[in-house]
Image (cartoon, helix red, strand yellow):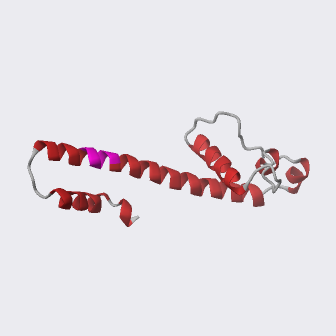
Amino acid sequence: MKLLDVSRFNKVLKSFTGDDGNHVTIMKLNFIQYIYHIFRLILIALIITYFIGCIFFFLSTHFNLSADIEAGATFVLANNLDGNERWSDTEKLILICYFALTTFSTVGYGDLFPVS
């Protein structure tokens, strides 16, 4: 998280250019800072999506009623995430992160939905 500290990034960026008051240099510094802010926002969103997806997969795997498991009415069983060879671990991770992102952004396309 220290790498994502904005004030530290600004100090490093200003150390490369010095204290030149040139308008072009100031515009370049502002542009680089905006790009950094966008990159930081995307990185934080991906990290949050990853952890929420992992928590959801853990909860949907371990906390189901036995009647739902027998009927196959769980998110994991409905989407064949229960250890079949259909999905690799990377594909499962992408699927769960996609579900978490669409759910928490309230888009909810409907292709993946909680079952129980």
Q: Where's the N terminus, which quadrant? A: bottom left
Outermost residue to the right: 70
Q: Residue at x 16, y 47 (%)?
A: 25
Outermost residue to the bottom: 2
Residue 102 on the magenta span: no
Q: Residue at x 30, y 45 (%)?
A: 34
Q: What is the x, y in percent for residue 52?
A: 59, 54
Q: Main secondary structure of the magenta part?
A: helix
Q: For residue 64, which quarter of the picture?
A: bottom right
Q: Residue at x 45, y 48 (%)?
A: 42
Q: Nearer the viewer, residue 65 or 88?
A: 88
Q: Nearer the viewer, residue 66 or 16?
A: 16
Q: What is the x, y in percent for residue 79?
A: 78, 45
Q: Which residues are magenta?
A: 31-35
Q: What is the x, y in percent for residue 15?
A: 19, 61
Q: Is residue 38 left or right of residue 84?
A: left
Q: Is residue 102 left or right of residue 29?
A: right
Q: Residue at x 69, y 50 (%)?
A: 91
Is 101 drawn above or below residue 54 in the view shown? above
Outermost residue to the left: 21
Q: Is residue 69 left or right of residue 112?
A: right
- Numbered label tally: 0
Is 94 drawn above or below residue 59 in the view shown? above
Q: Is residue 29 left or right of residue 102?
A: left
